[in-house]
Image (cartoon, rainbow, N blue to C red):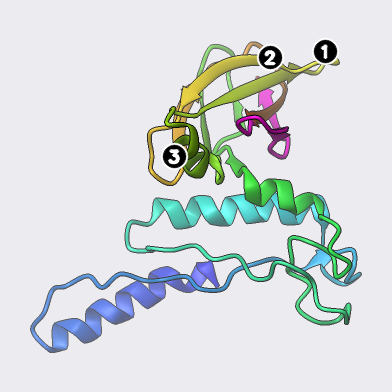
């Protein structure tokens, strides 16, 4: 569990000091996921799982000692009381969390006063491969829709320079509303992140 990572780090450091070493050993996360409802009715709703998945990856990214992030599973098992942490149902049909994994979006603070910027963190997971294929930097759009609007509008374009497609920027929004990411595959479909809610006081 992510909540135990700080305890694990302190334990590793304490043991290491017994041997006269101050080395901060890295940590690899090799299995992570959230069971979803559906198909398992006693687990978290799909939208909540999508938020938690992005939040967990943000926490992982924020800790310099964690060197990997590995989704478990791709497809749910046939039994609905098993590890239903897949990005797809057992049938292979995509869950809503598939989009959240493909293009994570997380805002550490979602409420602020008017005129104050908010941090927008995210990743376009396919972007590094796309950039290598066409030899061109990839750009992700941060889009916003106010509570009174029916359409999203692009408020910032971010050129992705991180080798893994991560970014973290500040953005000032005009009103309360919804935020999402938009990106297009080269010669392919346009895809979107999950939608995050923001509130201006």
Residue identified by numbered label 3: 132
Q: CA distance from mark 1 to mark 3?
A: 37 Å
Task: Between label 1 and label 3, give the one nearer the viewer.
Answer: 3
> Does residue 100 show up?
yes
Query: Compared with residue 103, is residue 33 higher up or lower down, i.e. above or below?
Result: below
Residue 156 drawn in magenta: no
Q: Nearer the viewer, residue 65 or 18?
A: 65
- What residue do we see at 64% from left, 70% from top? 72
Residue 38, relative to residue 168: is it above or below? below
Q: Position of residue 30 (x, y in %)?
A: 50, 73
Above or below — where is 147 with respect to 188? above
Q: Nearer the viewer, mark 3 or mark 2?
A: 3
Front one among 14 and 96 = 96
Proximity of marks 3 and 2: CB atoms separated by less than 8 Å: no
Q: Is residue 186 magenta?
A: yes
Residue bearing the label numbered 1: 149
Which region of the structure is painted magenta? 184-199
Q: Residue at x 56, y 36 (%)?
A: 109
Q: Earlier in the sequence, mark 3 or mark 2?
A: 3
Marked residue nearer the N-terminal end (1 or 2): 1
- The quadrant of the picture occupied by the C terminus is top right
- Residue 159: x, y in percent? 45, 25
Residue under pointer 2: 175
């Amino acid at each position: 569990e992510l909540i135990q990572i700080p305890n694990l780090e302190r334990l590793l450091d304490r043991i290491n000091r017994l041997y006269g070493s101050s080395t901060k050993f890295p940590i690899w996360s090799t299995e992570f996921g959230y069971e979803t409802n559906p198909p398992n009715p006693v687990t978290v709703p799909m939208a909540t799982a999508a938020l938690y998945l992005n939040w967990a990856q943000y926490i992982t990214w924020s800790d310099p000692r964690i060197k990997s992030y590995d989704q478990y599973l791709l497809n749910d098992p046939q039994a609905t009381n098993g590890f239903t942490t897949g990005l797809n149902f057992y049938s292979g049909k995509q869950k809503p969390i598939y989009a959240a994994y493909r293009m994570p979006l997380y805002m550490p603070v979602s409420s602020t006063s008017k005129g104050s910027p908010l941090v927008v963190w995210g990743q376009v997971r396919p972007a590094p491969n796309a950039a290598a294929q066409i030899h061109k930097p990839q750009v992700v759009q941060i889009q916003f829709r106010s509570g009174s609007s029916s359409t999203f509008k692009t408020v910032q374009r971010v050129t992705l320079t991180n080798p893994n497609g991560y970014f973290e920027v500040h953005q000032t929004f005009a009103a309360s509303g919804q935020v999402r990411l938009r990106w297009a595959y080269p010669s392919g479909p346009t895809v979107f992140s999950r939608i995050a809610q923001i509130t201006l006081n």
